[in-house]
Image (cartoon, grey):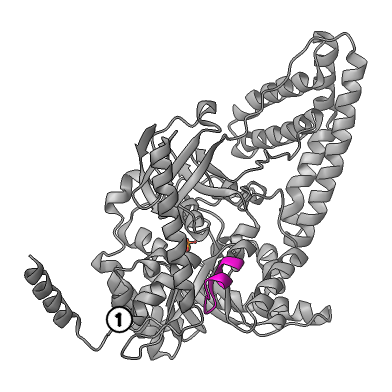
């Protein structure tokens, strides 16, 4: 039995077998063969198949994001048709009498060396395309295309690190807990784990290798440790604790449907932050007053190409219909920073959190944005959808968005497609937006404060960097003042102000936010009912100072 401590991301107890997640690094098979004709034929067939796949991806991307975004798949097709490339692989097979896989991989290495050494950045970046194309052929040759390891039993996932794209691809029905060696508490991966409402730890110094695979373990999310190979007594103790937690959750169910109102009558909406339809189930189970934040970029992560308008429309329609009249705030895509999507072909940036992220991508590549907006406007016919724009810093951005909205409405009219008039709001997650929230409030229907980024940008602390955590203080006076300014300015203009960043679910802050006048708190579905209980027991008519004095007195009497 071994107990290893890390940092807690989300509480709860998980008990199960470990599944070690390794980033895919394919071993290229190698064999000598005299049947070179057969190998050339295998290569040729794989090439044909790859060309077909790329054509399908091209068509899908063109529909979802326009010709320029689809161009990458065309470029990959051209590479596969290139005589020089084909000859290079075939020559290797013939001369060296090797299998097709090995010849493809060797050709990739050679081309990579040539392209990477070029001064011209455009050409050197083509090395990544060669790699992409070769990997496609290799997976077709090995017949392992997109096969993911399938686990039968629920598991505790242990990994060195997980990117948001990897996290969204994990079988959510089966994962009991996330445990990673690296990572930051404020990263999107950590936030995803919270949304899934399962115990999660980061910074756990384990060796995530085969030796751990299949071992029994207990994860204590509250205390921040994993126990590997627990003895029978420990196992029994934590099974009991898990059962107690389950009963506690069941007891909280009695609060479902009850209004979140303090003893002195201050009402607040308690909504859910989600990223997929599984999250929607959880929001319903926990009696959310609405969806306060649907992170739509999850529809883009872990995919081979852009989701089409129809694909998005279906998801947004389901959200709207399932919530049956309750508000569903869908944030337009917030790709960039730690959320990478290969097919977006973004340029490498020195400082991506401050680079082309979220609304900036949408304004630079309006075809991608328009596809999403058309889907949202169409789906809003089926329920109360609101649209939320991330990373806003200026009034001009809102004006540009409105121009695009006019264009998509025109397009929908021309196609005779029904659409609604969703409310539009913005994230206040940059100090700039908070400071000009008086001006912004005149332009939009609501504010939603993103404290995760607001903290990062106000305090100049990279939320991704675990070594900077001691400087990441969401309680910092500067952050709290920006929140207060935003609430005041929003209310002056008569619009609603919510908080959807992680600070919104911090029980230490609930009372302060209610006193500021925050109208809505959007939190992980699992935090809704415990928060509701806290709010319903709160009395804001007792001043905070009076309360402190009472607590002091009580503490004195106890000691
Ligand atoms: C935030 O920044 O607080 C927020 C809710 O957005 P995200 O965490 O997805 O960046
Ligand atoms: Mg944010």
User: The N terminus lies in which quarter of the figure?
Assistant: top left
Which sits in the foreground, 213 or 70?
213
Residue at horizontal 87 percent and vertical 43 percent from the top: 52
Which residue corresponds to mark 1?
A: 538
The answer to whether 57 is drawn above or below residue 480 in the figure is: above
Position of 137 with respect to 297 (left or right) is right
Residue 362, by quadrant, is bottom right
Judge whether 307 appears above or below 370 on screen: above
Residue at image x 71%, y 76%? 379
In this view of the protein, can residue 408 be seen by the observer? no
> Does the segment drawn in magenta span residue 371?
no
Asked if the stretch drawn in magenta spans residue 284, the answer is yes
- Mark 1 burial class by Cα count in 10 Å: few <14, some 14-19, many 20+: some
Stretch in magenta? 281-292
Q: Position of residue 293 (x, y in %)?
A: 53, 70
**Residue 284 visible here:** yes
Task: Give left or right: position of 25 versus 255.
Answer: right
Q: Nearer the viewer, residue 356 or 154?
A: 154
Q: Position of residue 170 (x, y in %)?
A: 61, 47
Q: Quadrant of residue 419?
A: bottom right
Q: Position of residue 450 (x, y in %)?
A: 43, 68
The x and y percentages for residue 449 are: 42, 72
């Amino acid at each position: 039995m071994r107990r290893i401590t890390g940092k807690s991301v989300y509480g709860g107890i998980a008990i199960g077998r470990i599944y070690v997640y390794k980033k895919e690094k394919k071993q290229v098979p190698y064999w000598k063969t005299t049947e070179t004709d057969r190998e050339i034929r295998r290569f040729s067939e794989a090439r044909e198949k790859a060309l077909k796949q790329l054509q399908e991806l091209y068509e899908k991307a063109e529909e979802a994001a326009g010709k320029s975004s689809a161009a990458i798949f065309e470029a990959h097709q051209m590479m596969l048709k290139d005589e020089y490339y084909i000859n290079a692989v075939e020559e290797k097979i013939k001369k060296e009498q090797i299998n097709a896989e090995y010849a493809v991989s060797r050709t990739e290495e050679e081309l990579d060396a040539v392209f990477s050494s070029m001064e011209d950045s455009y050409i050197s970046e083509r090395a990544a395309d060669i790699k992409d194309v070769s990997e496609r052929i290799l997976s077709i040759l090995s017949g392992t295309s997109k096969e993911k390891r399938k686990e039968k039993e629920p598991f505790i996932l242990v990994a060195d690190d997980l990117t948001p794209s990897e996290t969204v691809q994990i079988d959510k029905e089966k994962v009991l807990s996330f445990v990673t060696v690296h990572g930051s508490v404020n990263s999107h991966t950590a936030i995803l784990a919270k949304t899934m409402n399962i115990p999660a730890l980061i910074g756990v110094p384990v060796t995530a290798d085969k030796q751990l695979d299949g071992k029994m373990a207990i994860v204590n999310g509250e205390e921040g440790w994993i126990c590997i190979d627990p003895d029978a007594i420990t196992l029994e103790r934590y099974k009991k604790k898990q059962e107690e937690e389950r009963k506690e959750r069941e007891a909280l169910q009695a609060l479902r449907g009850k209004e979140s109102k303090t003893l002195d009558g201050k009402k607040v909406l308690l909504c859910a932050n989600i990223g997929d339809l599984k999250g929607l189930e959880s929001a319903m189970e926990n009696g959310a007053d609405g969806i306060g934040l649907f992170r739509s970029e999850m529809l883009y992560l872990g995919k081979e190409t852009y989701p089409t308008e129809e694909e998005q429309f279906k998801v947004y329609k389901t959200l709207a219909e399932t919530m049956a009249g309750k508000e569903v705030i869908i944030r337009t895509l917030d790709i960039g920073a730690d959320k990478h999507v290969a097919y977006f072909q973004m340029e490498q940036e020195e400082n991506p959190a401050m680079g082309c992220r979220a609304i900036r991508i949408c304004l630079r590549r309006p075809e991608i944005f328009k596809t999403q907006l058309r889907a949202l406007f169409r789906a809003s016919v089926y329920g109360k959808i609101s649209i939320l724009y991330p990373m806003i810093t200026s009034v001009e951005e809102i004006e540009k968005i409105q121009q695009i909205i006019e264009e998509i409405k025109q397009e929908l009219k021309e196609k005779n497609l029904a659409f609604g008039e969703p409310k539009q709001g913005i994230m206040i997650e940059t100090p700039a937006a908070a400071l000009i929230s008086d001006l912004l409030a005149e332009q939009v229907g609501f504010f939603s404060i993103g404290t995760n980024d607001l903290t990062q940008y106000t305090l100049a602390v990279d939320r991704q960097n675990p070594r900077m955590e001691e400087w990441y203080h969401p309680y910092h006076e500067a952050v709290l003042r920006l929140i207060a300014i935003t609430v005041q300015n929003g209310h002056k203009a008569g619009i609603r102000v919510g908080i959807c960043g992680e600070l919104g679910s911090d029980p230490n802050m609930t009372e302060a936010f209610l006193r500021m006048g925050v109208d809505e708190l959007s939190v992980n579905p699992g935090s809704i009912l415990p928060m509701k209980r806290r709010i319903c027991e709160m009395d804001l008519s007792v001043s905070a100072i009076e309360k402190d004095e009472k607590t002091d007195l009580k503490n004195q009497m106890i000691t």
